Image (spheres, coloured by chain):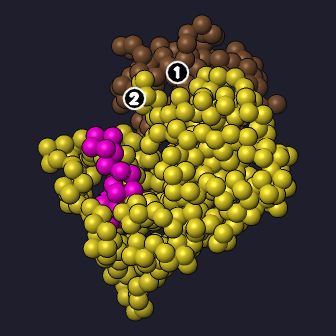
Chain colours: A brown, B yellow
């Protein structure tokens, strides 16, 4: 069994974190400049979240299967969880097929410097929002 | 210090030999294909380089079912789709690419739909999109070079949207690479220099990049040593098959290295320079290599000090700083030798770049996908200093 015991809990944690990033100008401004629409498809547990950076504000939409994404990323929930701690090298994960990316991958890679601050935010977010049991210390 | 994790995977069989392109059907016997569709371009065909390959294959009982020669300078979606269609209609069981980077990338990308059907962009654009292997794919490079015969990526130009699409997957790696110096013998001096410096830049950037590993470093230094011993020779005398062969091998080694460890600021500056001013990629890398090394000096000086030895410099008794400086000086000296030998530009102004747009190059370097692999953070305010120096 993975880190998260259910899709509902995983959605609560991850969507909440994505919304925190959307409200953090240091990160959000650069994501909005990219105009990307990313659909994240997670397994174990299963969850799909669209992060839409194409408008004036970042919109985080779980279970949105209708929006036409620009980039589609597939990975397990555990890999996603490790990634937001800064513990997964994106390029390595793609070569190892721990992540599958459909669409313009260079556009995603260009965002990596922008989301770097989130690696320190995630453990803090988990502790401050009652999700401390998921923290990797 | 060792990386926390890395992987090294290179399934491509590489064979080297003078005249081998007329006689490699023994190696083709390993693959489940007796019929190959050939992809090349008009220049290579007009030079007569394809005939001995086709004759050798047919004598060995392997059929060439058709030929596609219309690959443009930047491999396009249209070319990729046409190759796949024609190869399928010809009854081919595998693909063979004879050419430089664009030809190889077009054939590599065509193998997606040639092997598994579907929609080229919708189904395959991205990374790791394949779930099973492709049909047999053989590459004979005619430049030395992009090293595309040993990389897992293909870059295809979307003419309609004026953008480049990246496709990467370990299944894209060719099954067989045939390195034959007779295939690069007629490469003109300027192209020999430009493609050779592209290979050198691959090796240097891969060696110092943040994703480097002991495996990719080993391939990089082997490439660098061969390049410094043979590039000028192959520019000054194209008939020197020993030098030509060494450069083909170096390009392959460098390609393997950077396929695993990526590239950084030098390519980061070269890409926008190519996009804004149509400066050929190898020429841009030639100009920017010493300046990119200067940019990374403090972060990379221990590594540059080691590279100086492989560049043929005597670094015995020198401090790290002085030995590292020798590496940059060696690159500058190589650039001057090449400029004298064939007139390759070694300043941006001589390559058609205008002074009023240098900041766009610096900003483009920050935005480029390679910036995340550079050992030093890429910031426009500092990049511009080196772009101006390159001007």
Relative side of B199 to B366, left or right: right
Mark number displayed over residue A119 = none
Furthest toward the left, the residue is B356
- Which element type, helix, strand or loop, lies under badge 1? loop
- Judging from the image, mark 1 belongs to the subunit labelled A
Location of mark 1 (residue): A70
Query: Residue at image x 57%, y 63%?
Result: B183
Camera sees residue A92:
no
Relative side of B240 to B139, left or right: left
Quadrant of res A95:
top right
Q: Nearer the viewer, mark 1 or mark 2?
A: 2
Query: Is residue B290 found inside the magenta-colored segment of the image?
Result: yes
Location of mark 2 (residue): B162
Vertical placement of residue A1 versus B368, above or below: above
Vertical placement of residue B162 versus A117, above or below: above
Q: Which residues are magenta?
A: B274-296
């Amino acid at each position: 069994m993975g880190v998260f015991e259910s899709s509902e809990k995983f959605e609560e944690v991850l969507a909440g974190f994505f919304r925190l990033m959307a409200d953090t100008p240091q990160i959000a401004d650069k994501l909005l400049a990219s105009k990307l629409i990313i659909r994240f498809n997670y397994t174990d547990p299963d969850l799909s979240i669209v992060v839409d950076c194409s408008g004036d504000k970042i919109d985080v939409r779980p279970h949105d299967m209708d929006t036409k994404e620009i980039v589609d990323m597939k990975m397990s929930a555990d890999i996603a969880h490790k990634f937001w701690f800064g513990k997964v090298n994106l390029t390595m994960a793609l070569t190892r097929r721990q992540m599958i990316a459909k669409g313009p991958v260079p556009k995603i890679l260009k965002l990596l410097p922008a989301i770097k601050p989130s690696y320190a935010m995630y453990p803090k977010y988990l502790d401050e929002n009652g999700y401390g049991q998921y923290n990797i210390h | 210090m060792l990386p926390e994790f890395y992987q090294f995977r290179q399934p491509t069989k590489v064979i080297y030999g003078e005249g081998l392109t007329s006689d490699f059907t023994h190696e083709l016997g390993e693959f489940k294909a007796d019929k190959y569709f050939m992809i090349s371009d008009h220049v290579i065909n007009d030079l007569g380089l394809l005939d001995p390959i086709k004759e050798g294959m047919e004598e060995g009982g392997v059929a060439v079912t058709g030929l596609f020669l219309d690959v443009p300078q930047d491999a396009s979606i249209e070319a990729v789709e046409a190759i796949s269609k024609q190869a399928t209609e010809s009854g081919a069981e595998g693909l063979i690419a004879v050419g430089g980077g664009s030809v190889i990338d077009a054939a590599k990308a065509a193998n997606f739909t040639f092997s598994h059907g579907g929609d080229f962009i919708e189904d395959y654009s991205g990374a790791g999109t394949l779930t099973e292997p492709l049909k047999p794919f053989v590459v004979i490079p005619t430049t030395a070079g992009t090293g595309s015969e040993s990389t897992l990526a293909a870059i295809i130009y979307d003419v309609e949207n004026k953008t480049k699409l990246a496709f990467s997957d370990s299944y894209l790696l060719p099954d067989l690479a045939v390195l034959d110096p007779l295939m690069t013998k007629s490469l003109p001096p300027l192209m020999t220099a430009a493609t050779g410096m592209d290979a050198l830049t691959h090796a240097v950037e891969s060696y110092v990049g943040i994703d480097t590993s002991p495996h990719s470093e080993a391939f990089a230094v082997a490439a660098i040593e061969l390049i410094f011993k043979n590039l000028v020779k192959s520019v000054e005398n194209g008939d020197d098959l020993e030098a030509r062969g060494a450069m083909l091998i170096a390009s392959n080694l460098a390609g393997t290295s950077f396929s695993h460890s990526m590239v950084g600021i030098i390519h980061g500056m070269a890409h926008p320079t190519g996009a804004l001013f149509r400066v050929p990629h190898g020429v841009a890398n030639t100009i920017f290599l010493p300046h990119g090394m200067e940019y990374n000096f403090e972060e990379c000086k221990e590594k540059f000090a080691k590279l100086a030895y492989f560049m043929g410099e005597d670094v015995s008794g020198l401090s790290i700083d002085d030995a590292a400086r020798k590496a940059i000086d060696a690159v500058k000296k190589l650039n001057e030798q090449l400029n004298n030998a064939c007139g390759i530009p070694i300043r941006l102004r001589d390559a058609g770049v205008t002074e009023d747009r240098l900041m766009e190059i610096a900003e483009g370097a920050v935005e480029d996908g390679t910036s995340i692999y550079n050992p030093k953070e890429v910031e426009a305010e500092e990049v511009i200093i080196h772009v101006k120096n390159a001007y």
